Image (spheres, rainbow, N blue to C red):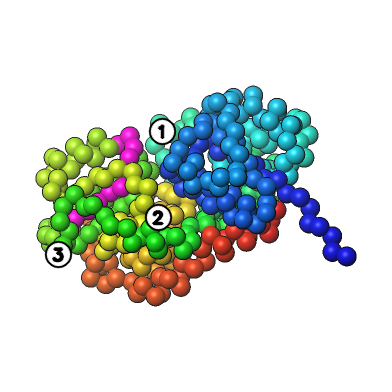
Amino acid sequence: MIKDKPHKKVLFIINDLGGGGAERVFVNIANAFVENNIEVEFLVGKKRGIYLDFLHSSIPVAEVGGTSFYSYIRAFPRFLKNNDFTHIFTASDYTSAAAIIIKKIYGIAAKIFVTHHYSYPPTRQLKYLPGDTILKLIHCFITPHADKIIAVSEGSLKWLRKDSYHKLPQGIFIYNPIFDDTIYLSATESVQFPIDVKDKIVLLSVGRLAEQKDHITLLKAFSIIKQTIKNAVLFILGTGPLQSMLENYINENNLSGSVFLNGFETNPYKWMSNCNVFISSSIYEGFGNVIVEAMVLGKTVVSTNCPSGPAEILKNGAYGYLCNVKDPSAMATSIIKAIHKPIDEKMLALATYQYRSSEIVKNYIDIL
């Protein structure tokens, strides 16, 4: 007689379900768990965000009421003690730390699976020192007590081991579940470009308008490109705190007819399918979801060789073009090369198969 598999009940904890990479990954994994008859719940700091609409209708979503460390410390004891979760996935250092502390204090049986989504560059500005110091303390003294640590790339895991001064034997890396067949349907939708792009070389970047994504270097590179490729245009999808600064740079450098900030787009795939080259200009990443998405749609990618995902995804330049971080000239050169010598679409399709949600989720199910 075959014994029934032990019942699993999984809780995902995240600040909200806004338009970030970690949020999208948690939703993809949770939906796949439901399809595999695994019970799932969400606990969010604030019940908001575009991905609420993407979450499987059977998944309950509870709200803490705040996103601070102290909000989670106050809410976790009652919530975690009153539910029979077998596994808890966390997606930020503060929620992870709070969950680990409460588990230890109250003897909660659920296993804490910390997911790690970033790696910082070797040097950072002094303004980040207070926050980085707190994170280092968390990594050194709290993170090692997680039952499992799941980094989104090999480089990200190596960075965490170095930053924590621990070998972290429970650490593994699992690439993000990026796509399923719906991406191809979404890519067929029509795009309402702000200008006529017929006979244009269309460049595209997708990412939050924040310091990490370093769009200013991309704009400087584009200014160089325009000197020789007059019909090049650049579209940037995303919103963020640096929007006004980028708009000012575009206006002051006479790029307003060629560069367009198009805001957040729920379906970036239709834009990707209509571009010639996709560009990621980040200073750092944990993985680089949009790089894979562009490759899935057969698009040649230019990315900064930042820590830690892009070089892994592009196999050190075999599947795309890598350039130095914060180097407009090098980026412009790589983009021009990509325009004139795109990567074979069939090769990209083979290279990205490993990132299909169905393939990645198998790894998550195996570790439960």
Does residue 180 lie above or below 244 as drawn? Answer: below
Front disc: 2 or 1: 2
Q: Position of residue 165 (x, y in %)?
A: 62, 45
* Residue found at the very far front of the displayed protein: 57
Q: For residue 340, which quarter of the picture? A: bottom left
Nearest to the observer: residue 348 or residue 226: 348
Three-letter amino acid code at the position of disc 1: Leu
For mark 2, what is the residue? Answer: 290
Q: The N terminus is located in which quarter? A: bottom right
Give above or below for 259 relative to 98: below
Q: Earlier in the sequence, mark 2 or mark 3?
A: 3
- Name the mark nearer the viewer: 1 or 3: 3
Q: Is residue 111 visible?
A: no
Front-most of residues 239 and 153 = 239
Q: Is residue 239 magenta?
A: yes
Q: Which residue is mark 1?
A: 126
Real-space Cα separation, disc 2 to disc 1, in angstroms:
29 Å
Label 1 CA crowd tier, 10 Å (few <14, some 14–19, many 20+): few
- What residue range appears in magenta? 233-242
